[in-house]
Amino acid sequence: MKQIIWSNWNHEPIDHLRRLGESRISIFTLGEWLPEWYERLHGEELIKKAAEMGVNTIYTHFFKGFGLIHEYDDMEKMREFVKIAHKYGVEVIGYIQLGTLNYETLLDEIPNLQEWITRDEYGKPLTYGEHYYRWRPCLESKEFIEYYKKVLLYGLEHVGLDGFHFDGARARECYCDKCLKAFREYLTEHIKNPRELVGLKHFNHVQIPPLSEDWDKKPDEIHDVLALYRGRFRHYQLHKAETELFDFIKANGGKYVLHNPGMLRDDFVGYCDPALNPKSCDFVFAENNKFIVRQNDKNVNQVLAYKVAERFGFKLFDAPWLHVGKKRMGDSDVVIPNEKPIIDRFLAQGMIYGGISGAPWFVRSKKTGSVVAMDDENHFHVVKHAFDYFKENGELYHAKSIAKVKLLYCTDTFYGFIKSSYMYFQSKAMWLSDNNVPYVLITDDEIDQTEEGDVIILPDYKYASNAQYDKLKKASERGVRILMLGEYGLCTENGKERDHKNKIRNLEGLQGVITDLPEDVKFKTTSENTLVDIKRNEKGNVTLHVLRIDNEGTLPSVGIDFKNVYVDTRAKPVAYSIDGDCSIKSYEITDEKVHIELKNLTTMVSIEFVK
């Protein structure tokens, strides 16, 4: 895959913006300026400027669920724009809304649309939040899937798109007959001992356990086996539908699939399990509140999302919003990043952790005629400088994490403690970053690959299988350290409480259990509020990355120390940085430790240990 430098190019068609009826500083841009701004996005001048800045991939509007007939005119506009973008070497990913159908227009094209949609436990159609005019499709509807294949084929063959961005792709509740049949079949396939587990001989007559979509009404924990399997079924259901659509794109010549599954939102059950992301997916969209910033005495960043992406085989489009201050009437508290320190650290985070760069705000409207963020000359040159650096040093960031700390990713507890466990998992990942501890994600299958000196972290996994415990036990016997945060194994993976004398509970009797992060896995810097990662690039060289979150000024001297379990003592460190005058003042590499002294560090530095 080519080196990706991406930008949003407004993913909403003009009719949706008109129908939406909202006004705020965001990509959902409304008001008197809308026609002029929208028209400019489809012209040559702006995409040429983006290409000059370094952008080579954009995602933009294509299909919003109004229907092929209603959206025909906008698709024709997009077809002409794709030709212009390709002229400047920019590939175009078309937005497609997977989660909603606008019945006010689509019923003209599909009179039986009601047969495609999700329904609550009382048979009432489910809508997209307060948008009462947007029905939600049922993923078990074969007619819906086939219609979307028709849309995709039209985008590839007629519009000339290079791929698709699927939005609204999340695990929705639905209680229609098709979903009920699929749920019973799922239980039959995955539970081989129903009498022993749930007291039933079969699942022929069970109903789907109801779950409120109101966060405040969701249960704190679940022990009902069928309710646990409902969450797993919803994620499987989403995976199955996405796989069919994504594979269809690749089979018909599409290059890229971008997917927005609600990455790292608090509601794990209601969104997605990234481990089930289809193999045919290239990019995942992380639209959340984790813009990299020091705020309210806390570090906020997207490191975990990048780690998840690395582990499960896709690249990340980092698309959070920067929130500042309080909401005011008309506009929200979302602002367009415009200062060099903010832009630099955002773009550097993508390079370091994802081997990718880009941002969602370059063509956001300034609500004055057709003016966009990229029109600011200072903004343009700051971004171009960062992109030029990335293009020149791209090989440095095509790398794989090699950290000794392994954060175990296990979903059993996420399905049980649905309101707390996923957030706890995320908080512990943030805790590692705050302590300058590089880490990688592993799954159960990779516990067997851990080595002496590694540290496996278990973030309050109250639900755990016997098989997982056995793997941890063997790992501890070969010198792997186990850090249990919170509790472990109080219940089986199916929510059944274990006997209080069972040694699986809280890892009783397991050797190698530790109670705090060992000092030898910490990377120590003399600069506060830094992020540190260590990788091995495609040339086989170890690369150390340091990123400052509070990068408002330049530090004349910064020291970095870590235990040497990574670097060949014969290697020579070479520094690379978007901060032009950052360099290595001195260094010492022994079998025991590595010490680096930097000068003039502002935002970031990548140190390649060249053998």
Image (cartoon, grey):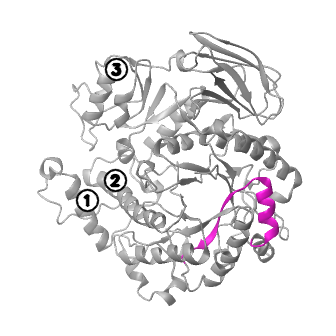
Q: Is residue 502 above or below residue 89?
A: above
Q: Earlier in the sequence, mark 2 or mark 3?
A: 2
Residue 49 lies in the magenta stretch: yes
Of residues 216 and 110, the one nearer the viewer is: 110
Q: Is residue 353 visible?
A: yes
Picture disc at residue 476? 3
Q: Nearer the viewer, residue 447 or 537?
A: 537
How far apart marks 1 and 2 lie (CA) works out to: 9 Å
Per the rendered image, the range of residues in magenta is: 42-65
What residue is pinned by disc 2?
A: 232
**Residue bearing mark 1:** 186
The disc label shown at residue 567, or none: none
Image location (x, y in percent) of residue 402: 52, 29
Quadrant of residue 581 in the image?
A: top right
What amino acid does circle 2 point to? Arg
Front in this rendered view, residue 491 or 41: 41
Q: CA distance from mark 2 to mark 3?
A: 30 Å
